[in-house]
Amino acid sequence: MTHPAHDLLTALGVSLPDGGDLPVHSPIDGARLAMLRSATPDDARAAITTAHHAFLVWRDVPAPRRGELVRLLGDELRRHKAELGRLVSLETGKILSEGEGEVQEMIDICDFATGLSRQLHGLTIASERPGHRMMEQWHPLGVVGVISAFNFPVAVWAWNAALALVCGDPVVWKPSEKTPLTALATQSLLARALARFGSDAPEGLSQVLVGGAALGEVLADDPRVALVSATGSTRMGRLVAPRVAARFGRALLELGGNNAVIVAPTADLDLAVRGLVFGAYGTAGQRCTTTRRLFVHESVADALLTRLDRARASLSIGDPLATGTLVGPLVDEAAFGRMQAALSRARGDGGEVSGGRRMLADRHPHAWYAEPALVRMPGQTAVVREETFAPILYAMRYRDFDEALALQNDVPQGLSSAVFTNDLREAEAFVAASGSDCGIANVNIGTSGAEIGGAFGGEKETGGGRESGSDAWRHYMRRATNTVNRSRALPLAQGVRFDV
Ligand code: NAD
């Protein structure tokens, strides 16, 4: 019997091999979707060689023309949003509207990058020397290696690839070994865009390496990969970053988060509950920006936690493709095991746990559905300071705003944060230099669900990278400072004299 995923793959232009070493399962029911062949490290090196040759051609194609390719990719994504969105849901277990939302995010970044292709601007700088002009140009950088995580299997590639392609850089992509099918489908849509684009696109502008960490290591080590953009756990970042640094390559790291929300006495509790429920339990707690910690003022704690727990208990958990489902499965058994281990540590620290049980085990013995958990913690213990990639929200009470802010910052990660308050001073303090130390700091909206227009990423163990909007494109280019002398003299800077 063929799986419905096969029809989607056919519609998206992907034909599966007859066999292979890499099984791909759907977290929805544990069904095997495909067996794929992993690439070898030699295949990875060959892909980098092809990409490098592509770079030598692509860097000279005018940027607005490169933008045309990304525009065509956006067209293909618009046309196939439903199929690719459904495949994202099948392969990751996220609910259908989030699967489609992920494809919409790809479309948005394509639009953004297409416009950007006419705005890759440098500066003209006043020279201190007469008859001289100084300017800064941004040139294509080289091959970009993208390592991506399972939970945003295609949007993260698009954030990188749309910018890289307009900036003049080919992309070699190593998707998560848990989600290679959506990667193959995306690559197929790009192939269609390339077919419509014309002959000035070199072969190997975009390649996919299906397989595990060893392929990511090749990208990290190869000096021809000018930028390694790696998204995943902090554990992975710790392994990849020193390898890239050892060869003085560039790394853009998007690693784990441990995101907090502060709910202040003046907060609109309706907004806060909605923001917290989506932030903590949406995507089954498997977003890098998932809300994992809550600091609630003691004056509103009982009211908020009662409502939050009621909302938590009412969430419909089940088939992410079914209408009305809000929480799908965890990605695999190991993720469920980590959730249980964290909950038992929290209990050991005096935490009171609501929820957290396995669900739907009778119907889906090979899938891992979990009831979202709310844990009332006496304080920010070690387990709270770690990222557990599951729907667990640790709630703590506070008395003093500065104390809550200090606790929110007192974790190794620095991705996303939010405050719910109607006190202008608190709101401004939160986004000030001495406020939240995260890459994302929001007021009266939750921690997750970023738009592509802003730069995305975080500080400390989150890795410091910025992707997507704003001026993140600069990571994908190299800066050249040029001084041009139109005079007949050769004055030296700083008044230095060296007359011969
Ligand atoms: P993971 O770290 O297990 O894997 C991520 C990717 O890294 C995979 O493609 C994997 O094959 C590769 N990899 C693993 N070890 C490697 C090595 N030694 N060398 C090279 N590549 C290696 O992460 P995951 O479980 O797929 O995703 C969840 C994690 O990703 C969470 O920690 C989450 O917070 C993080 N994440 C961060 C962001 C962000 O933008 N900050 C976005 C999505 C996910």
Image (cartoon, rainbow, N blue to C red):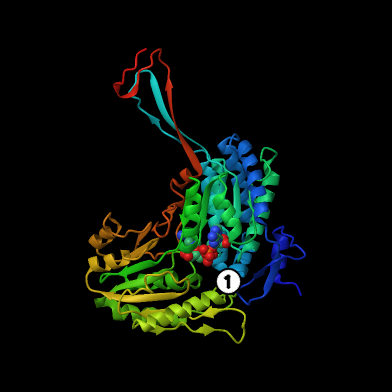
Q: Which quarter of the figure is the N terminus placed in?
A: bottom right
- 219, 151: nearer the viewer: 219
Q: Is residue 69 above or below residue 315?
A: above
Residue 144 coordinates in the image, percent (x, y):
56, 47
Residue 495, by quadrant, is top left
Label 1 packing within 10 angstroms: few (<14), some (14-19), many (20+):
many
Which residue occupies 49% across, 81% down? Answer: 371
Q: Position of residue 436 (x, y in %)?
A: 31, 60
In which quadrant of the rendered view does residue 404 lie? bottom left
- The residue indicated by pointer 1 is 93
Q: Nearer the viewer, residue 458 or 297?
A: 458
* In the image: residue 190, left or right of residue 465: right
Q: Quadrant of residue 492?
A: top left
Dot 1 amino acid type: Gly
Residue 353 visible within the image: yes
- The quarter of the image holding the C terminus is top left
The residue drawn where x is 30% and y is 57% is 431
Q: Is residue 398 left or right of residue 41?
A: left
Q: Position of residue 468 (x, y in %)?
A: 48, 51
* Secondary structure under the numbered disc 1 in the rendered image: loop
